[in-house]
Image (spheres, grey):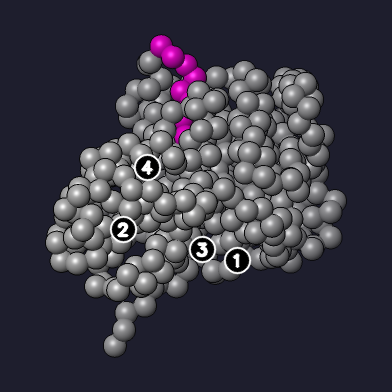
Amino acid sequence: MSVQIPRGTQDILPKDVAVWHVIEDAAKRICKLYNYDEIRTPMFESTDLFQRGVGDTTDIVQKEMYTFEDRGGRSLTLRPEGTASVVRSFVENKLYGLPDQPAKLYYIGPMFRYERPQAGRTRQFTQFGVEAIGSADPAIDAEVIALAMTFYQDLGLKNLKLVLNSLGDPESREVHRNELIAHFEPSINEFCSDCQNRLEKNPLRILDCKVDSGHPLMETAPSIVDFLNEESRDYFDKVKNLLDNMDISYELDPNLVRGLDYYNHTTFEIMGGGFGAITTLTGGGRYNGLVKELGGPESTGIGFALSIERLLLALEAEKVSLPVNKGVHCFIAAIGDKAKEKTPAILYNLRKAGITADMDYMDRKVKGQFKQADRLNATFVAVLGEEELDKQIINVKNMTSGEQKEVKLEELSAYIGQHI
């Protein structure tokens, strides 16, 4: 009986990996421009990290985590998101003590959530995320948002919409929280069991419910923007002004609450259209209590995370073709046993010179080797037979121009290198 891939996962085959490389290289290049350094954290962490860091009222913690017990009886969880792990590392490794603050970090790696698989949403998915930890300056909010927009635009996406909201500081959220409870409590039995559980724990999460999104009380729910105190309102105005100065357009959405408990002040999403019901490409926001919650000092941060799988759907919907570098520089067609015996050493020297090269390993005839070179999109085909070996030369054909030339074997690397 054959063994098949687990539901909600995918194989990324060699023909598709090149596109992933372009995306990953773009992420690293943009982060370098913004002076963000890469951080790599474990793919599994203590379950307590996500319960405390993400929030035990979130769908992620309640329904979607892959949690298991190891042989030592410890509860571990495959990471469902990246922020909690990065902040844990920030605290554990005392990055807050370094002179260069804020800590500007990015990550690229797999995340795991038990969800119903659909387009753009798989159980193992790859996130690119950014975290800036240690600064309460609104300018860092604007920078993180600008980085995300720059990344998408650099890859060629045009149908983008930035949506903003403010969840305010803890004082503003507490006032709003009480108003939400008073609003929903009389009719809470009309809502799903999740919303009923959230009423006292975190009523803001009711606004993010997909099951009861059409309930009339959702339309009339108190808006957080009506309860922002002067400090929170001033902070949000500064963020908006900074984005205006960058000519980054945005829309305000008072119902944007995001799905994680640790957000306050600035929250945002970047939307894209054209590939089904799921239109959110990335989301993020500021978290002013998460570092302390995980055992660190009073410190603030802001970040975002995006799914590369969903990005690929957006690129496909907009018919954006990424500049993938396919093919090899040189294919050596070997004729005869002696030539085949010498070819691996020639390939080795080409590769040491930084030239991508290959040969036939299937005992194909000369015609079959040329077909193989075509399939590999070879720029040059170099033909080596016993006669050429005796003269220490090789016949090189430029497959674009059709030009052919005899080249000394010892000069092959230099010749190919000059013409690629």
Please name the amino acid that badge 1 sits on.
Answer: Ala
The residue to which callout 2 is attached is 383
Question: Comparing marks 4 and 1, which lies closer to the viewer?
Answer: 4
Q: From which residue to which does the magenta span run?
A: 99-106
Name which of mark 2 and mark 1 comes first in the sequence: 1
Please name the amino acid that badge 4 sits on.
Answer: Ile
Name which of mark 4 and mark 1 comes first in the sequence: 1
Magenta stretch holds residue 189: no
User: Residue 214: x and y, percent?
Assistant: 79, 63
Q: Are marks 4 and 2 in contact (CB under 8 Å)?
A: no
Displayed quadrant of residue 315: bottom right
Compared to residue 394, the image places residue 191 above or below, namely: below
Q: Which mark is residue 212?
A: none
Q: Residue at x 28, y 65 (%)?
A: 360
Magenta stretch holds residue 105: yes
Mark 2 Cα within 10 Å, few/some/many (few <14, many 20+)? many
User: Residue 143: x and y, percent?
Assistant: 63, 26
The residue to which callout 3 is attached is 122
Name which of mark 3 and mark 4 comes first in the sequence: 3
Please name the amino acid that badge 2 sits on.
Answer: Val
Name which of mark 4 and mark 2 comes first in the sequence: 2
Q: Is residue 285 left or right of residue 318?
A: left
The residue to which callout 4 is attached is 416
The residue to which callout 1 is attached is 119
> Along the line of sight, which residue is nearer the eye, 305 or 3?
3
Query: Mark 4 and mark 1: span between their CA atoms?
Result: 44 Å
Q: Residue at x 59, y 61 (%)?
A: 120
Asked which secondary structure carries label 2, the reply is strand
